[in-house]
Amino acid sequence: MVTMVRKPPGCPDQLSAAEAVQFLTPDLLEFLTDLYGAPASIAQGAVQLLPFGSRAVLLATGLVTIRSDGAGPEQGEILQFSDLAFEVMATAADDEIDEVAAQAAAIVAARLRG
């Protein structure tokens, strides 16, 4: 469950990557981690396919912005990743790499003992 908290007065409007991560569900964080290193056009396309709630969280945290793609009824709005989103992706990917490396080290150590 994601809980939105009003920032106290005097806090910056934009969240840091560490703050933004706190508002993401594990599934959404994994989704962003999987997009790390993907071409921007692929990442932009993938975010359009997320369920409404996930897109709402990304908008509320400033990870995505809405870009209007014209004025006609056939023209839609496109979600576009912000620089903060790419920062969150990199941070999450680094954390996942550290976790996988620790698991690999534990497996190697267990095999050497046994």
Image (spheres, rainbow, N blue to C red):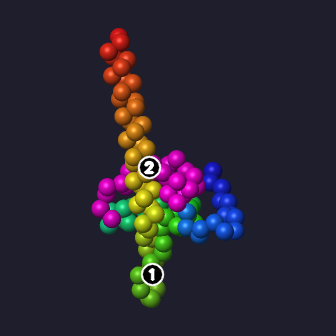
Q: What is the crowding at mark 2: few (fewer than 14 residues within 10 Å), some, or many (at least 20)? A: many
Q: Nearer the viewer, residue 93 or 48?
A: 93
Eye-nearest disc, 1 or 2: 2
Report whether residue 36 is seen: yes
Secondary structure of the residue carrying tag 1 is strand
**Residue at image x 37%, y 17%?**
110
Circle 2 SS class: helix
Q: Which amino acid does label 1 sit on?
A: Ser
Horizontal arrangement in the rendering, residue 69 relative to residue 57 (left or right): left
Q: Name the residue under label 2.
A: 92
Q: Is the magenta stretch mostly helix, strand or loop?
A: helix
Dot 1 or dot 2, earlier in sequence = 1
- The span shown in magenta is 16-40
Give the farthest residue toward the bottom.
Answer: 71
Rendered residue at 43%/74% (across/down):
78
Q: Which residue is drawn at 40% across and 60% down?
A: 86
Compared with 114, 9 (above or below) is: below
> From this viewpoint, is residue 54 visible?
no
- Residue situated in front as seen by the camera: 42 or 73: 42
Q: Where is residue 5 in the image (x, y as percent from the top left)?
A: 67, 60
Instruction: List x then y, in percent, for residue 99.
Output: 42, 37
27 inside magenta stretch: yes
Res. 97 mark: none
Which amino acid is tagged 2? Ala
Q: Quadrant of the C terminus?
A: top left
Q: Which mark is residue 68?
A: 1
> Which residue of the protein is positioned furthest toward the front in this rendering?
10
Is residue 79 shown in magenta? Answer: no
How much space separates mark 1 and mark 2, taking CA atoms? 29 Å
Estimate the x, y position of residue 47 in percent, counting from the top left.
43, 63
The residue lying furthest to the left in this view is 39
- State which quadrant residue 56 falls in: bottom right
